[in-house]
Amino acid sequence: MIPLLQIKNLSIDFVTENRTTHAVSDISLEVNRGEIVALVGESGSGKSVTSLSLLKLLPQPPAVYAGGNLLFSDDGTTAIDLLQVPDNQMQSIRGRKIAMIFQEPMTSLNPVMRCGKQVMEALIQHKRLTATEARRQTIEWFARVQLPDPERLFDRYPHQLSGGQKQRVMIAMALCCKPSLLICDEPTTALDVTVQKAILELIKELQQELNMGVIFITHDLGVVKEIADKVAILYRGKIVEADTATALFQSPQHTYTRALIACRPALHPKGERLPVVSDFTEPGKSQNIKVKAAAKPPEQKEVLMEVTDLVVRFPVKNNIWGKPTAWFTAVDGVSLTIRKGEVAGLVGESGCGKTTLGRTLLQLIPPTSGSIQY
């Protein structure tokens, strides 16, 4: 069978009045059905530009396709060049045959549409469902991506959800039409580790169930090692190494690949020397830095901010006179002290109240009770 996707000698430039930037240079890659291919590289290496080109979402100008082909075969017998497909045909491909989980849900979701309606829109457009059936399937998908209380979140706007919850809405929107090719652009960046594990398992499960091809773009080599079948390493718009995940992690050939693997975040022993790729001018010229010993805890200094029994509640249901009758508690009796010269870490899963607490400290959200002394 013809591979699901063949990227052949793709080159993309961004042309302005002052300069031409070669974002992607002569890259080639294949994705087969039932296969997860990871694109890995530092910021600006061309990963997202490559993925956006598959859906023809790059604005032209300034984007110019300098060469190459994007061959997509949904049936395994005939292939179409996505670069040559007219816009009206691309509308039937986007979301139905090729779907994408975008990197930043805040700018990808429509801020004036309720979250459930945005997923329903894709189901009605591509699967021709009735509004009632589309609503039912949307709530099912919200439950599959582990959104709490799916029926209630169906009617919420994006600004009423946490960052991780918005990301899960985007994931549900991409998966709901069961595409042949799924592009995941940093899909778990905003998620805590427990939800991240569940989402990765869901993507893996659907990929196997639907025999779906997946392009997984990430900086997280731990995720790549866990789920990817093949890995392509991008550096300055070029694929410098491509291999199976097992072979690449066991025996990386390119200097840049070895540097990336060596720089995986970890709890390193005190004083261990690590290769780094900052200011990477040419492959093979990585430098070394010495990890500093952990700083001593700061002495008991003057209190900068003291929070006592802070509670923040939001009304979720009103009576006919507009008076709230039910509340959602986002922050429940939090107390904390921050001293001058001290860094306080605030850690918790998606939707646990971290951002609400920070906004309340700045009085962007009024507290329900408690005190904030500055």
Image (cartoon, rainbow, N blue to C red):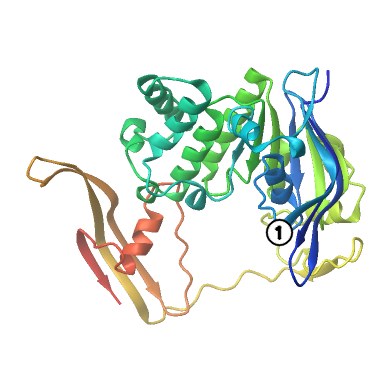
Give the quarter of the figure containing the C terminus: bottom left
356 or 74: nearer the eye? Answer: 74
Residue 146 falls left or right of residue 219: left
345 or 173: nearer the eye? Answer: 173
User: Residue, x 48% and y 70% (percent of image)?
Assistant: 343
Q: Position of residue 27 (x, y in %)?
A: 86, 46
Q: Is residue 374 above or below residue 197?
A: below
Question: Tag 1, which secondary structure?
Answer: loop
> Please, which residue is most extreme toward the bottom here?
302
User: Residue, x 75% and y 48% (percent of image)?
Assistant: 40
Q: Is residue 276 visible?
A: no
Q: Position of residue 24 (x, y in %)?
A: 81, 53
Q: Residues within 10 Å of mark 1 (few under 14, many from 20)?
A: few
Q: Position of residue 199 (x, y in %)?
A: 55, 34
User: Residue, x 49% and y 31% (percent of image)?
Assistant: 122
Residue 22 placement: quadrant: bottom right
The residue under label 1 is: 62
Residue 285 falls left or right of residue 70: right
Q: Is residue 99 visible?
A: yes
Please, what is the three-letter code of the amino acid marked with disc 1? Answer: Pro
Residue 53 placement: quadrant: top right
